[in-house]
Image (cartoon, grey):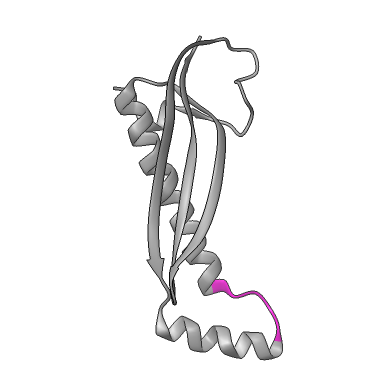
């Protein structure tokens, strides 16, 4: 099993300067987060006056980090040392809750 901190992550189809020697297939990680009522009230005020919705920005950053960590855990379990072609997707699950999904192809490079 590979340590997550040593797994190369890239949005490219390969790792520059390295050769893909083994494909493990799709790896993925996701998290579903619900909005906080207090943040919703503050967001409503921001919608009136304009500006960044910092509470939601932080929520998305945390969600991306968690989804990537879960993806890397799966890649490490398979024996991969890189995940290529990484992408993110979001979807609404129910009113007030959304899924953030990270996925890519687990590979071994040398």
Q: Which residue is drawn at 69% across and 79% down?
A: 51
Q: Residue at x 56, y 42 (%)?
A: 87
Is 52 in the magenta? yes
Q: Which residue is drawn at 46% across and 20% down?
A: 107
Magenta residue span? 50-54
Is 89 in the magenta? no
Q: Up-down: is 19 above or below 90?
A: above
Q: Position of residue 22 (x, y in %)?
A: 45, 12
Q: Residue at x 44, y 57 (%)?
A: 63
Q: In the shown orientation, is residue 12 left or right of residue 7?
A: right
Q: Position of residue 41 (x, y in %)?
A: 50, 89
| Residue toward you, 93 or 42 | 93
Q: Position of residue 55 (x, y in %)?
A: 51, 73
Q: In the shown orientation, is residue 105 left or right of residue 19?
A: left
Q: Position of residue 83 (x, y in %)?
A: 49, 28
User: How many discs appear?
Assistant: 0
Q: Up-down: is 71 above or below 62?
A: above
Please name the predominant secondary structure of the magenta segment in the image. Answer: loop
- Residue at the extreme right of the image, as rendered: 50
Quarter holding residue 26: top left
Q: In the shown orientation, is residue 6 left or right of residue 3?
A: right
Q: Up-down: is 38 above or below 59?
A: below
Q: Up-down: is 100 above or below 16?
A: below
**Quarter of the N terminus within the rendering:** top left
Quarter holding residue 27: top left
């Amino acid at each position: 099993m590979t340590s997550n901190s040593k797994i190369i992550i890239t949005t490219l189809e390969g790792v520059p300067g390295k050769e893909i020697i083994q494909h493990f297939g799709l790896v993925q990680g996701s998290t579903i987060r619900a909005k906080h009522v207090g943040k919703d009230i503050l967001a409503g005020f921001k919608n009136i006056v304009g500006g960044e919705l910092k509470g939601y920005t932080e929520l998305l950053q945390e969600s991306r980090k968690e989804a990537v960590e879960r993806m890397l855990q799966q890649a490490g379990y398979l024996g991969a040392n890189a995940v290529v072609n990484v992408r993110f997707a979001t979807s609404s699950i129910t009113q007030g809750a959304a899924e953030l999904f990270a996925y890519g192809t687990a590979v071994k490079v040398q």
